[in-house]
Structures are given as structure tokens and as C-alpha cells.
Amino acid sequence: MLFILTAPQQTGKTCWLEALIAELDGYHIPTYGVIAPGRWKYIGEKRVKLGIDNILLPTHERFSLATKAAGTSGTSGLGWTFSDTALSRVNAHFHELSHAADIGCFKDCAAAANYHKDSVCSTDCRNSHVGGILIVDELGPLELLHGTGLTEALLVLQQGPRQEPQPLWSHAVIVVRPSLVSAAKELLRGSWGTSELIQPTDSSKALLLETLLA
């Protein structure tokens, strides 16, 4: 199933995902994809968002994705200057995930199931993938309106659930702002069929866990 996590900006969607990933770890359910936590700083009493990081899953490699631009400038007028190097790194990660799905192995599943980083296509590594979930934080204007950004993530999502030759993920969670939900649903309808809208709430987490553990 495709879960669409949607809520207004700066309402804790990525924090909710981080808590979800930690809980899934306890069930030994591996996560694949990317999350995008913000970089914040207090200026006086005001909490200001200065940048956006990316954390790749399952490796948990972290790096800067974007920095705040002046006014409404920046990449595609979004108010953020995105690093081409970082976008390329994330796209390469999703390309690798797609290839891993094709051969039933991901070369670095350390964070998913306590395996060493140099574990390459071991039987244990492959077995750890059963019942995983794909996470994409987020699909925004770059991807859904401009055809840029995390293009490889979209390609992986458009392949739908990955079950052969080893089951990597049967479900996915994508983060989409409310104004772009219709565009995301239309783009991915043929790959995932029905989708479920969720919010960063305890009830949505319970629904997702119930689905994954069924």
C-alpha cells in the first residue's frame, strides 16, 4: 500500500518519520529511502529553519541538501538553494536501491538489521529485507511540477511494490504537501492502486504498524 503523509509545512512530519523508523527498528522492519530533517537555530526566542539535510536509509548517511535563500529566490523560486551534489547523491542511492531490488540484495543493510557495512549480498543480508518499507521525504514542487529533484525516487516509486526476486518492500510512505496530494496520487495510481492519506499522528502510526505487521 502507498501511504501519503501530508500536513502543512513545519508540522513535524519528518520528526514523526524519525520516531516511526525507530519503532520499526524494534520490530526488525528495515526502512529504505530518504528522510529530510531540517537544520534549526534559535535567533533570540525565534526558532529559524536554516537548512535541510538528507538522511539515507538504511545507511543513515547524513549530509546537507539545501540552505535558505534570500526571499523567494533559490532553486525554482522555492526559497531554498539545493545542492546539485546532494541531489545526485540521493538519486544515486535510489538507483542503487532499484538495482538491489532487481537482484534481491542491498550492499549496506547495517542500519536495517545490525549488519556490518562491508556485508555484500550475504544470505543474512537478503533475509533481513523481508517486510521492509520504502520512505521518500519528500516529493515536492521540484519532483511533481518541474520534473527535477529526486527523479530516481519517482522512478523507484513508479515500479510499485518490490517482491521479486526477494521481497524488499510491499509498502511505501511518501511525504507530500497538501496542495500536491492530487498530483502525487495521479502520478502513482497505476503503480500502487489505492493510497491512504495519513498525518503525523499516533493514530496514523498505529494504522501503518498494523498494516506492516499483518
Image (cartoon, rainbow, N blue to C red):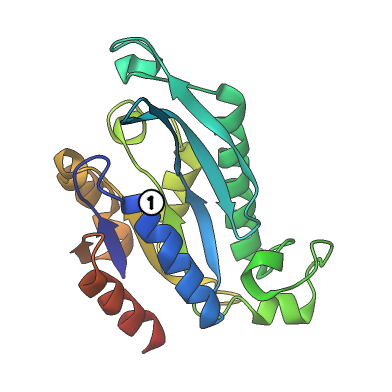
Image quarter hosting the N terminus: bottom left
Disc 1 marks a residue whose amino acid type is: Thr
Q: Position of residue 118 (x, y in %)?
A: 84, 62
Q: Which residue is drawn at 29% across and 53% down?
A: 188
Q: Mark 1 points at which residue?
A: 14
Image quarter hosting the C terminus: bottom left
Instruction: Specify whether 6 is left or right of 49.
Output: left
| Residue 167 shows in the view | yes
Q: Residues within 10 Å of mark 1 (few under 14, many from 20)?
A: some
Q: Which residue is drawn at 32% across and 84% down?
A: 210
User: Is 153 in front, or is 203?
Assistant: 203
Instruction: Specify whether 207 is left or right of 94.
Output: left
Q: Which residue is drawn at 31% across and 36% down?
A: 140
> How many discs appear?
1
Q: Residue furthest front?
A: 44
Residue 47: quadrant of the picture = top left
Q: Residue furthest right?
A: 118
Q: Position of residue 35 (x, y in %)?
A: 47, 49
Instruction: Specify whether 204 is left or right of 23.
Output: left
User: Is 206 in front, or is 118?
Assistant: 206
Disc 1 secondary structure class: helix
Residue 169 vs 62, above or below: the answer is below
Q: Which residue is drawn at 46% across and 37% down?
A: 151
Q: Position of residue 144 (x, y in %)?
A: 29, 35
| Residue 148 shows in the view | no
Q: Where is residue 192 in the image (x, y as percent from the top left)?
A: 31, 64
User: Is 37 in front, or is 138?
Assistant: 37
